[in-house]
Image (tube, grey):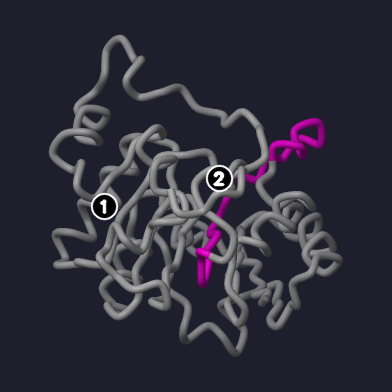
Amino acid sequence: MNDQSQPRKRRPRLVAAKTLPNPTDYVLALNGEFAEWAYDEQRALQHRGEWRQQFGLPVEHPLDLEIGTGNGYFFAHRALSEPSRALIGLELKFKPLIQSIRRALRGGAKNAKIARYDASCIEDVFAPGELNNVFIHHPDPWPRQRDYKHRLIQTEFLETLYGLMRAGSFVNFKTDSEDYYEWALPLIQQSKFKVTRQTRDLHQSEWAGENFVTHFEQLFLQKGQPIFYCRFEK
């Protein structure tokens, strides 16, 4: 690897794909049919600091990240609507991981790859200054107070993410959980990032027109549930 700095040592919350006794078709596809575009948790670590090389791109080329791709509708949309930018997805679960990259490839995307890894240990996968824009849409809200420690947005995570991103880049964060939003927003405001957008009802805001409605988001909109959103920039 080109980058010689060492990531902080924390244990990611995942079981290695190759150790599963009865792998599903999605598990097998990760290192089989989609091996050129999808990386298991071991292969992902091998490219820290060199992700642009995986795309055959120069170091100045924009490289964006979606954390938690779900079934991949936004992932595919982003890849296809921004072909001049490379896109990497991080997803823990095998089925949505394969669904995401397959959806992008079927649409004709040539700028998308995906990796299986725990985003709370994101510094294992990416080197300082490697990332441009980051998208965090509807992360697990961990609604019980005793589980707040498992939420992705944490002070340490924000500090780490700031170091991994390039100047002038932004993070888009949206959630259907008011509790999560109210809990996370002060942490973001106290971080090195600058909050440039915030709203408690994205679909009634000035940014509604540019928002891509994910499949998960649509389910909440049908129930009249507002979507909470903020953008913060480096």
Residue 75 point in image, percent of width and height:
35, 62
Residue 221, position as x, y percentages in the image: 51, 64
Tell me, yes or no, whether the highlighted magenta stretch contains residue 142.
yes
Q: Report the residue at 79% width, 52% height from top.
A: 155
Name the residue that disc number 2 marks: 119
Q: Quadrant of the C terminus?
A: bottom right
Label ID, residue 101: 1
**Whole-Å distance between the Cαs marked 2 and 1?**
18 Å
Q: Is residue 216 above or below residue 149?
A: below
- Sequence-wise, which precedes: disc 2 or disc 1? 1
Quadrant housing residue 227: bottom right
Label 2 neighbourhood size at 10 Å, few (<14), some (14-19), many (20+)?
some
Is-magenta flag for residue 187?
A: no
> Looking at the image, which is closer to me, 208 or 220?
208
Residue for point 20% across, 67% down: 109
Residue 14 image position (x, y, % from top left): 50, 27
Query: The magenta stretch spans which residues?
Result: 130-150
| Element marked by disc 2 | helix
Q: Position of residue 61 (x, y in %)?
A: 38, 76
The answer to whether 183 appears left or right of 201 in the picture is right
Q: Amino acid at mark 2?
A: Ala
Asked which secondary structure carries label 1, the reply is helix
Which label is found at residue 166? Answer: none
Residue 132 relative to residue 190: left or right: left
Q: Name the image quarter holding residue 98.
A: top left
User: In the displayed image of the protein, which residue is found farthest to the bottom?
Assistant: 206
Direction from residue 70 to residue 30 in the image, left or right: left
Say few, some or many: other residues with alpha carbon within 10 Å of mark 1 (under 14 / 14 to 19 / 20 or more): many
Tell me the residue at 81%/65% (across/down).
191
Q: Type of residue at label 1?
A: Ile
Snapshot quadrant of residue 207: bottom right
